[in-house]
Image (spheres, helix red, strand yellow):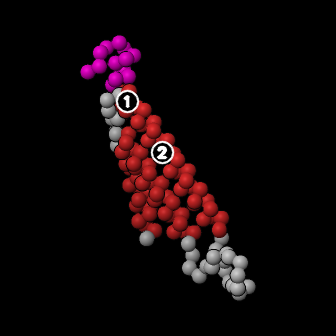
Amino acid sequence: METLFLLTIFIGLVGALCRKNLMLKALSMDVMGTGVIGYFLFIASRSGMVTPIVGNAPETVAYADPVPQAVILTAIVIGFSIIALLLVCLMILSKEYPTLDIDDIERVEAGKRTGKPRP
């Protein structure tokens, strides 16, 4: 199970490094973030732990630490916010350029600097 999460992280990293399309890079970053969150949840979950709720639990029971759960929940919210902001930036960029391919955007920008018309 652990290898599946590490494979998801690796696939997201390779996609973020190798793809030229900015939308696919954003998708790869989201896949990588999902793999990291899943891996942390897998590591934080331990069998035999009891949820720390006040009640009739015996004193010798091992309680689960709620701090990793709060950190993961915060990471999910922050990751969602970053991806949403990135997609808004890509929408604005797509209105200025006809494509989201990095090479084409660099070619257009180089043409603007040298004063040559866009190919």
Question: Residue at the spot x=44%, y=63% of the render?
Answer: 5
Q: Quick check: 106 left or right of 82?
A: left
In terms of secondary structure, where does tag 1 sit? helix
73 up-or-down from 89: above or below: below
Question: Residue at the spot x=62%, y=62% of the render?
Answer: 70
* Amino acid type assigned to the residue bearing label 2 in the image: Ala
Residue found at the far top of this picture: 115
Q: Quadrant of residue 9?
A: bottom left
Q: Quadrant of residue 61?
A: bottom right
Question: Residue at the spot x=40%, y=49% of the render?
Answer: 28
Q: Position of residue 39 (x, y in %)?
A: 50, 64
Q: Is residue 55 magenta?
A: no
Q: Position of residue 14 (x, y in %)?
A: 38, 50
* Residue 95's disc number: 1
Residue found at the far front of this picture: 55
Q: Position of residue 57 (x, y in %)?
A: 69, 85
* Amino acid type assigned to the residue bearing label 1 in the image: Lys
* Pointer 2 local density, CA inside 10 Å: few below 14, some 14–19, many at least 20: few
97 up-or-down from 36: above or below: above
Tell me if residue 68 can be seen. yes
Q: Quick check: 43 left or right of 92?
A: right
Question: Residue at the spot x=38%, y=39% of the render?
Answer: 22
Q: Quadrant of the C terminus?
A: top left
Tell me if residue 13 can be seen. no
Q: Is residue 115 magenta?
A: yes
- The magenta segment is 107-119
Q: Which residue is mark 2?
A: 84
